[in-house]
Amino acid sequence: MDKQCRKRTYVRMLIYNLVLTVFFILSSVVLVFRVLLKGGQLRFSHFFARLGFYSRKVTDRIDLTPAGERIWIHAVSLGEVKIALDMMKEMKRQDSSKSFIISVSTQTAWQSANEVMLTSAGPSDVLTFYPLDLAFSVRRAIKHLKPSAIVVVETEIWPNFILAASKYGIPFFLVNARLSDSSVRGYAYLSFLFRDVFSRISHVYAQSAMDADRFKRAGVPEDCISVSSSFKFGIPKRNPDKENELRAWTGGGPILLGGSIWPGEDVLLLKAYVRLKPVIPELKLVLVPRHSSNVPAIERHVRKFGLNSCRRSHGQQPVPGTGVYICDTSGELSSLYELSSAVFVGKTVSEHGGQNMIEPCAIGKPVVVGPYTENFRQVMKDLLSEDAIVQIPEADAAEMEEAVIKVIGRFLTEPDFASAYSNRAVAAVEKRVGSMEACARDIIARIA
């Protein structure tokens, strides 16, 4: 980088850091209050970890491994945690000498990752929080954790962190990476800051050719981008004990499952349930909201339909005649998919973007989604090309509702129709499994 370019980058980062520091100071009172409100020393340690101050438990584990053998994998939130942990396991399988730092950005993600780390982590592996993108925080984090490489799942672009990694000569990888249309526009608008940041990324493993092109336009050199299928294409491991536990909760009979639903989609599924119940007397409706804060509204809607519901997180047991089951706990959706007879995947009708539709397809369930699946464009393109999923076209709200209910009805009353989609879904996923293994192998080779 020439002197003039370094000067421009310095000035831009100075402005960025001033703005970010002011924002942090103004919000710190609220952050501390929330930490105190949610309670306890544990969450205070998480708060300080985001500033680059780590507990003795973390630093003692870090000291067990030479810096050159430590890979830092970051998962932004709960949705990426499974990929990060699977990536860690795959890298361990390929090179057992490596130790790992797993970081997250949310409390829910930390809880989910911690459950797995308790059984899967080695003695020198650690779980912590991703540092806030303050200059002193990222410097402290990198100096104390001493990673030999940083791997970020999907897309988390923080200027100070990426520039600090570059300064210390630490390769920075984006895996299972994607950029949305809106993100491309945003980065273009702030290209005076982000173009140099993108140019420091060592390699991007993009989900699709479209994502690869977007990263190129954002500033990643073309020879630092490769295309692989989504890491989410994989066959989930079953948990028979959890499945038995959930089956005991829901009881027998076919299950219509709404996975990761958003407000409004519960009403759609309640309408489907009420219409289909006379035809399928044993039918159960299981609703899994994306956010537990939506449960009170779901319960109100259930009552308006004159139905009884049972809420999982409250330890409620169904009373006779219960037809609606609300599962608002974490880590149980996969097992519920195994028990389901038909699946609707949320954030595709009342909201835009879509939740992960790969998992129910991978285990051979007939799946229907709405028209709004922008977060999974390439995935949907792959599944639709194999006729492995039903997507409802965009229309007015009433027409979309009616179309979803009609497809669900066919899934539940026409076994051959449902079975055909189930078989094609499994085949479509199996065809695309293996991208994570290849990516892990490539990263290990690059940092050897």
Image: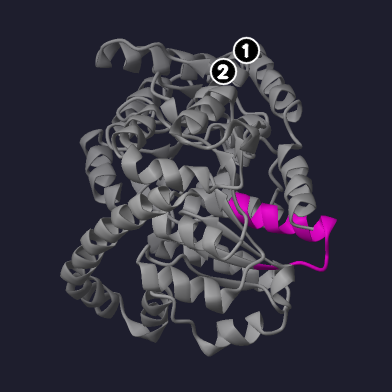
Q: Count the marks.
A: 2
Q: Residue at x 25, y 36 (%)?
A: 306
Q: Up-down: is 10 above or below 320? A: below
Q: Position of residue 210 (x, y in %)?
A: 53, 23
State the extent of the magenta-drawn residues as a range. Answer: 82-100
Q: Position of residue 63 (x, y in %)?
A: 67, 84
Q: CA distance from mark 2 to mark 1?
A: 6 Å
Please name the residue that numbered disc 2 is placed on: 381
Task: Left or right? Give the position of 335 relative to 270.
Answer: right
Q: Position of residue 420 (x, y in %)?
A: 68, 15
SS at circle 1: helix
Q: Mark 2 is on which residue type?
A: Lys
Magenta stretch, overall SS: helix
Residue farthest along the front direction in this orientation: 3
Quick check: marks 2 and 1 in contact, CB under 8 Å? Answer: yes
Disc number placed over residue 385 in the picture, else none = 1
At label 1, counting other C-alpha atoms closer than 10 Å, the crowd grade (few under 14, some 14-19, many 20 or more) is: few
Disc number placed over residue 135 in the picture, else none = none
Q: Position of residue 167 (x, y in %)?
A: 53, 62
Could you tell me which quadrant the C terminus lies in? bottom right
